[in-house]
Image (spheres, coloured by chain):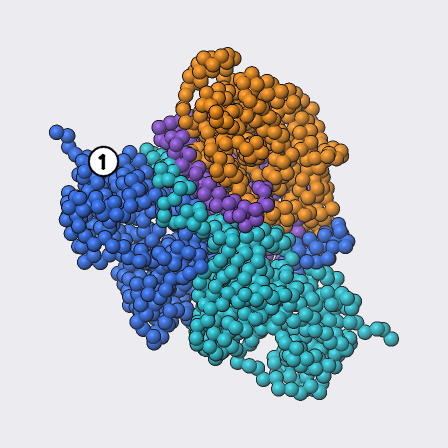
Chain colours: A blue, B cyan, C orange, D purple
C-alpha cells in the first residue's frame, strides 16, 4: 500500500479551511494543519483553533509564531518608510499574509510535504499572495486550493461538513474581521459601497477613555524601543503595549480605498491605533533629523515598497535594496516623541533628539545669526535665480509678446 | 531739478514697512505703496492699511486683488496634487508670497517704477521669494531691502519713526499671524522649540460648534465647484464658504516642521480648515477615479511641486509641465464627497461619481463574478511569479546554502 | 441556415497566420484577413500579402495604414521622451503591436465581427499586447488564438496546409526580422545566448557609404519637421527619408537585453538608424533648451512610459498624463541639430536654437560677467552649505569620534 | 614677534596658484602648498609641480595621493549607478574636485592651518565645490580666494610674478585640459559655442590602433576586478590598464552639455575610454542580472546622485543612503563582459554570469516551455487588463461619444 501524500493546510478554523480538511482527507491526503500567528492571536485563541483542528481529524496541527520575524523583516521597514498605502492604510492585513505564507512553506519543507493547501477564494488578494510565495519558495510543491477551484456556496460547504459528521454554528458575522500585529481590518456592508462609512460599533475596540493622556515613544535608529520612559525587550512589545493604551481612545480608525492585485478597486475599514501613532510619531522625528532630500526620496521609494508588499511581491529583489536604503536613512532617527491621546484622535506634540537639525546653535529660523548675513542670502538668491532668469529672458526674446503666467 | 526716482513698496502697515516708507522718502524716492490681497484681507482691513499708508505720507497707495489669480494659477494645482508639505502643511503662506511678488512687479512695471522695495529681514524665506520673482520678472529694476540691509532693532525703527513724527502702538503680538486664502500661519513661542506645541488659544479661530455636521463638496475635474448642493461662481467662494463653516469646528490645525529655503529647519503652526478638508476630500475622490499608477506618479511630482513652490521657484519651467500633468490627471475627478465635521477633527465619509472605478458592474472585490475566473487568477499569478521565481532559483544555484530572507 | 460567424484575422502571410485562415474556415468562420502597416511595408509587399490571403481563400482582405496614426499617438512621444528601453532599444517592434491591435479592433467593429484572431504563440510578448488591446477595446468580442491553443509544430502546420491544398516554401530564415517605421528587429541564433552578438550580415542594411557626411535635422516643439534644410509634410517623411540616408552608414545597430512582459529576460538585435539619430539629436537640443529639473523628471517619466508601452499597457490612463507632460516640456525644443554620419557610428555635432539657454548674453561659463559677482557666489555657497554644515556639526556633537566618509 | 598665520594652498603649478603663493606670502602667511592626486598625475609630473612650488618659495609642499580613496568612496558608486550625466558625461573632473577638497581639509587640519586657499575664479563650478567642502568640514577655518576676489587679468598676474622675481613661460594652451582617474576634460574654443564640436586633434590621445580587438572585463559585485582574465589588486589598476589599452582606439570621446552649479549652461569635451567602457559593460551585466524594477529605480536614484555630486553636494546625507542602495543592488552583478574595441567606437558583445537571469532552464523567450502554458498567459492577460478595461467601460458609460485615443 502506498504511503499517503502529505499536505500542509493553512488552517484558520473557519468554514472554508474546515471544509478543506475533510475534502483533502477524502482525496487521500494526510492533512497537517498549520496556523501562523503574526500577532493577532493570543494563547487561548490558538488553543481553540488547535482543538478545532484535531476535532476535524487532522493528522497533526501546529501553531507557528511569526510575530517577531514579521516585525524584523517587514513592520520595521513599514515604520522606517512611514508606509500608509494611499496615505491612509498601514497595510494591516496584506503585509502579514506574506509572512504567513513563508512560514507555511518552511514548515511544509521541514515535514517534506508533497503539497500545500490554502482556503482562499478566487475573488481576492490573498490567493495571489499565498500562491506567489508558494511558487517562488517551493516551485516543485503542488498547490491545492479547493475553495477557489470548487466554488461551493457556504451552504454547500456546511452540508458537506454535516455529512462528514461535523456540526457547528457557521453563521457569519456582519463584518469580516482580521486581527494582526499591525492592525485589524474590518470589512463588509458599508465598505462594499463607495459612499457609506462604517458605523461606530463595527469597530472591535470601543471608546473607553475620554480624558486626554500624554505618552512618549522612544525611537532608536527608527525603531520604537520604549514607551513612557520604559525600555522594552522587543519592538513587538512596544507595539502591543501601545495598542493596549491607545485603543482605549478609539484612535487609528479609517477606511482605505485602493487597488487590489487583481486590478479592481476595493475598500476596507481598519482600526490600527499603534501603527498609526507610530508612523506619525516616527515621521515627526524624521522631519527634525533628516535632510529635505532624504525625506523626498524616501517618500517615493516607500510608496513603491508599500504598493509591492501589498501586492505580495515581497521577493522582488528591489525590496531588499529599498530596505537597505531605508535602514541607511535611519542612522539619526533617534529620540523621543510626545503624543497626546484624545477621544478618536491623537496629536504629535514634539520631539527631543540629539540629532535634531532644528537647533539654535546654527541659527533660529526668522532670527538673524552669525552663521550668514543678509548679503549672503542676496548672493544666494541671485545665483538661484540664474536659470529662471535666463529662461525668462530667452522666452521674451524669442517671443516678445509673451507674458508671464 | 531731477525727477525723483519712483519706488514701489510692498506695504503691510506693520513696523518694518512703515519704517521703509519714511526711510525711502528720506533717500529721495517717490514712494508708491502696494498691498496685495491673496484672500487674507477683508475690505475694512484694506481700508485701514490704506489709511496708514497715506498717514505715513506715501505718494500713492494701491490694493491689488490677486485672490482669483492665486487660485487659478496656484491653489488649483495644490488641490489637484493633494499638496501637503511633509504630509502636513498646505503651504498656507509660502504659496501666496510668489503671487504677491508677481502682482508687485506687474504694478511696478505699469507705473514705470525705478525700484521695488520690500521689508523682509535677512533671516527668513520671504526675502528669497520676493527677490527671486523680482529678479526673474524685472531683472533691470533695482531691489531695495532696508530692513535686511540695516538690521535695526525694533526699538531703533520705532525711534526713527517717532523722530519722523510717526507715533503708534507698535507692540508686538505674542504670535505672528498671517492670513490668506489657503490658510493662516501661527508662529512664535512654542514653534521656536522642537518639543512644545501651540496652546489652544494661539489659534485665531476658537471652537464654536460641538454637534457633528455632514457636508458635501462637489468637484468638477478636480476643482471644488459646489458645497452642500449649491454651485458657486468661483472655487474661491467655495473655499471661503467652507472655511467659514468648518473653522467653527476648529479643524485643520497642526504644526509644520520643514526645511527653509536657506537650509535650516523651521517650525510653524497653522489653521487651515478648508484647505485640509478640500485636500482630503479631493484625495478620496481620486482614490476612486484614478488608476494605481496615476496616483503613484502624481504623488512624486506633486511633492516636488510643493517643495519648489515653497522655495519660491514658481518660474522653474518644470512647474508648468507638472501643472499640465496634473490637469491631465483630473479628467475624471468629478463627483461629490461627503465630509463629517466634528470638534477638532473631520472624517471623509464617502463619494459618488460617475467615474467611480469601484463599481459592481465590473465585479465586487471579494465576490466571484463573470469577468474572470479563479483559473485566470492562477495563470496571472504564475506569470507574475516568473521573475521572482527565476531570481530565487538563480540565487539557490549560485549559492546553494542561501536561505530566503 | 445560420449565417456563419465573422472573424477578423490579423494576417501576415507567414506560416502561422496562413494556418489560422484554413483552421478558422474549417471551424465554420467567415474569415476577413487584415494586415496593418505601421511603416514596415511598401506597396509591393502589401500586394504580395493580399495575393497570399486570397490564394488561401479568405472572404475578404484589407490592408490598414496606421503609419501616420502610429507617429501621431506614439512615436512622437518616444521622441519627446528620448525613449530607449534600458538605454538602448527604441521599442522598434513592441510599440507598433499596440497600434496594429487597435486598427484590427476598429476594423472588426466596423464590420461587426463576432471574433478576432491572431497567430501569436504562447511564448512571447505579442500575445499579451494583442489580447490586452482586444479585451480593453472590445470586451465582448471573442478572441481566438489557434497557434497558442493548439501548440502544433511547424511541420504539423505545414502538413495541415498541404492537406488543405496549400503548398508553399515555408522554410524558415535564420533570423526573424520585423520591420516598421521605428526600426527593424533581428532575432535568432546569437540573440538566444547571453554572450554572442549578431554577425554583421545578420543586419538587413549593409554598409554602403564610407565617406563621412553631415546632415541637419530641424525640430519644432520636439517634432522632427525637416532634413538638410528641407521641410516635410509629415514627420513620418522625415523619419523615412533619414532612414534611407543614414542606413547606408550602417548606424543604429545594437542588441537589446530586457524584461519581457511574461517575466523572463529576452534579447533581440535591431537596426534603427533614424530612430537612434532622432533620439540623440533631440536629446542634444533638449540639453540646450530645457532646465535641469525638466530633464531630470522627464527621464523618470519617459522611462516608465517606455516600459509600460513595451508591455502593451497603452491604455493605462497615466500614459495620457505623461504624454501631456511631455508635450508641455517641448514648448522650447525648437531648432536645428547637426549630425555627422560615419561608417557604423554617428556624432551629434551641435545645435542652433533661439531657445538655447547657453547664450553669452547671460554670461559664458568660466568667464566673469556682469550678471553676478564672485561675492554673490560666495553668499550662494554659504547658504547652500547650511543644511550639510548643520548636519555635520550635529553628527560631530552627537558622536565626537565620527570622521567624515 | 607673532607667529605667522599658516595657510594651506591647493596648488597646481599654474599661473593662478603661483600668483597665490606670492600674494599670500606678501600678506604675511606661511604658505604650505598641496597638490592632490586623484589619478591624473604620474610621478614625474608631481615632481615638476613640487619643484615649481619650492622655486616659488613655499614653506612646505606636499603631494597627497587620493586615488584609491576616490575610487572607494566615489568612482565605485558611479560604476554601480552607470552614472553618465545627461546620459553622456562620466563626471570626469567634477567628482574629483570634492575628493581633492577633502584631502586639502584633512591636511590643513593635520598641520593646524589657520586658513585654506584655492585659486578658483568666480566664474565656474570649482569655487563652489571647494568652498562647500571647506565650509562643511572646517566651518571655523578661513577660506582665501585671491583670484576670485581680485579679478586680475592674466597679464596683471604675470606682471606681479615678474616683479616678485618669478619668470616663466605662462602662455596659455588652446584647450584647457584636466586629467584624472575617471577621464580627461577638454575645454575651449568650440566648446564655448553651441554648434561646433571639438576637432580631432583637440583630444590628447590620438588614434593608434585600427585592428579590432576583443577584451573581457571581470566584475565582482559591480566592481571591475579583472581584465582579459587577469585579476588586479585594485579596481584602480583595472581602470588605468583599461584606459591604456582602449585609449589607443580613441574611444570614449564626446562633448557634454549641462547645467552648472551657478545655473547657466556649460559645455565641455572629454575623453574617457575606460570610464565609458566600464559603465556600458557594467550596465550590460546588470541587464542580465537585475530585475526590471531594480533597473528602473536605480536609474532615477543614480541620476540624482550624479547631479548632486556634480554640484559638489557630496556631504548631503542622502548620498550615503543612495550609496547603500546601490551597493545592495550589486549583490548579483558578478560576471564577465566581452567588449570589442574598434577605431573611435566599441561594442559590448555579451556576458557570462552565474547570476544571468536569461537562462534556458526557466524557459527561453519565444519558445514554449514547461514552466507555464498559453492558458496561464491568457489568465495573466485577463487580470492585467482589468483596471484598463474598467477604466474604458467607465469612460464610455460616462461619456458615450468618447472614442479611444
- Local secondary structure at mark 1: loop
Compare residues C191 and A5 and report the one nearer the observer. A5
Label 1 lies in what chain?
A
**In the picture shown, does residue B11 fall above or below B378?**
below
Compare residues A332 and A144 and report the one nearer the observer. A144
The quarter of the rendered structure image containing the C terminus of chain B is top left
Query: Can residue C397 be seen at all in this image of the molecule?
Result: no
**In the picture shown, does residue C117 fall above or below B136?**
above
In this view, the residue farthest toward the left is A1
The quarter of the rendered structure image containing the N terminus of chain B is bottom right
Q: Position of residue C109 (x, y in %)?
A: 55, 35
Compare residues A305 and B291 and report the one nearer the observer. B291
Q: How many marks?
A: 1
Q: Residues within 10 Å of mark 1 (few under 14, many from 20)?
A: some
In the image, D299: left or right of A187? right
Compare residues C31 and B394 and report the one nearer the observer. C31
Q: Residue drawn at (59%, 60%), measured in percent from left and top? A: B76
Q: Residue drawn at (56%, 62%), measured in percent from left and top? A: B224
The residue that mark 1 highlights is A114
**In the picture shown, does residue A290 fall above or below B271?**
above
Query: Can residue A71 be seen at all in this image of the molecule?
Result: yes
**In the picture shown, does residue B291 fall above or below B229?**
above
Q: Residue drawn at (58%, 51%), measured in percent from left and top? A: B328
Q: Position of residue A368 (x, y in %)?
A: 57, 72
Q: Position of residue B198 (x, y in %)?
A: 46, 75
Q: Residue drawn at (70%, 58%), measured in percent from left and top? A: A404
In this view, the residue farthest toward the front is C1
Q: Position of residue C401 (x, y in %)?
A: 40, 60
In the image, C327: left or right of A244? right
Amino acid at each position: 500500500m502506498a504511503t499517503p501524500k502529505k499536505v500542509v493546510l493553512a488552517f484558520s478554523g473557519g468554514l472554508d479551511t474546515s471544509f478543506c480538511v475533510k475534502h483533502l482527507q477524502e482525496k487521500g491526503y494526510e492533512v497537517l494543519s498549520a496556523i501562523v500567528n503574526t500577532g493577532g492571536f493570543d494563547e487561548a485563541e490558538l488553543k481553540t483553533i488547535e482543538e478545532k483542528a484535531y476535532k476535524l481529524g487532522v493528522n497533526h496541527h501546529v501553531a507557528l509564531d511569526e510575530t517577531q520575524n514579521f516585525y524584523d523583516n517587514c513592520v520595521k521597514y513599514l515604520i522606517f518608510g512611514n508606509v500608509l498605502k494611499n496615505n491612509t492604510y498601514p497595510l494591516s492585513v496584506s503585509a502579514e499574509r506574506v509572512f504567513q505564507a513563508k512560514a507555511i512553506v518552511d514548515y511544509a519543507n521541514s515535514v517534506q510535504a508533497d503539497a500545500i493547501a490554502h482556503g482562499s477564494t478566487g475573488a481576492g488578494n490573498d490567493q495571489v499572495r499565498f500562491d506567489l510565495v508558494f511558487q517562488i519558495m517551493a516551485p516543485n510543491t503542488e498547490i491545492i486550493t479547493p475553495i477557489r477551484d470548487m466554488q461551493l456556496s457556504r451552504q454547500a460547504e456546511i452540508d458537506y461538513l454535516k455529512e462528514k459528521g461535523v456540526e457547528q454554528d457557521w453563521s457569519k458575522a456582519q463584518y469580516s474581521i482580521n486581527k494582526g500585529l499591525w492592525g485589524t481590518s474590518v470589512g463588509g456592508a458599508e465598505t462594499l459601497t463607495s459612499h457609506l462609512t462604517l458605523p461606530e460599533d463595527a469597530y472591535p475596540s470601543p471608546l473607553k477613555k475620554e480624558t486626554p493622556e500624554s505618552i512618549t515613544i522612544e525611537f532608536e535608529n527608527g525603531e520604537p524601543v520604549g514607551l513612557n520612559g520604559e525600555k522594552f525587550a522587543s519592538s513587538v512589545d512596544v507595539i502591543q503595549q501601545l495598542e493596549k493604551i491607545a485603543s482605549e481612545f478609539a484612535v487609528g480608525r479609517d477606511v482605505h480605498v485602493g487597488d487590489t492585485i487583481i486590478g479592481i478597486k476595493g475598500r476596507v475599514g481598519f482600526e490600527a491605533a499603534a501603527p498609526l501613532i507610530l508612523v506619525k510619531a516616527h515621521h515627526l522625528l524624521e522631519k527634525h533629523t533628516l535632510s529635505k532630500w532624504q525625506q523626498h526620496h524616501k517618500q517615493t521609494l516607500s510608496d513603491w515598497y508599500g504598493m509591492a508588499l501589498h501586492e505580495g511581491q515581497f521577493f522582488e529583489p528591489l525590496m531588499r535594496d529599498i530596505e537597505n536604503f531605508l535602514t541607511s536613512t535611519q542612522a539619526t532617527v533617534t529620540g523621543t516623541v510626545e503624543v497626546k491621546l484624545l477621544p478618536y484622535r491623537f496629536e504629535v506634540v514634539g520631539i527631543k533628539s540629539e540629532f535634531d537639525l532644528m537647533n539654535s546653535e546654527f541659527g533660529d529660523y526668522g532670527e538673524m545669526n552669525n552663521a550668514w548675513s543678509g548679503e549672503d542670502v542676496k548672493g544666494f538668491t541671485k545665483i538661484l535665480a540664474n536659470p529662471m532668469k535666463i529662461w525668462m529672458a530667452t522666452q521674451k526674446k524669442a517671443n516678445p509678446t509673451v507674458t508671464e503666467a
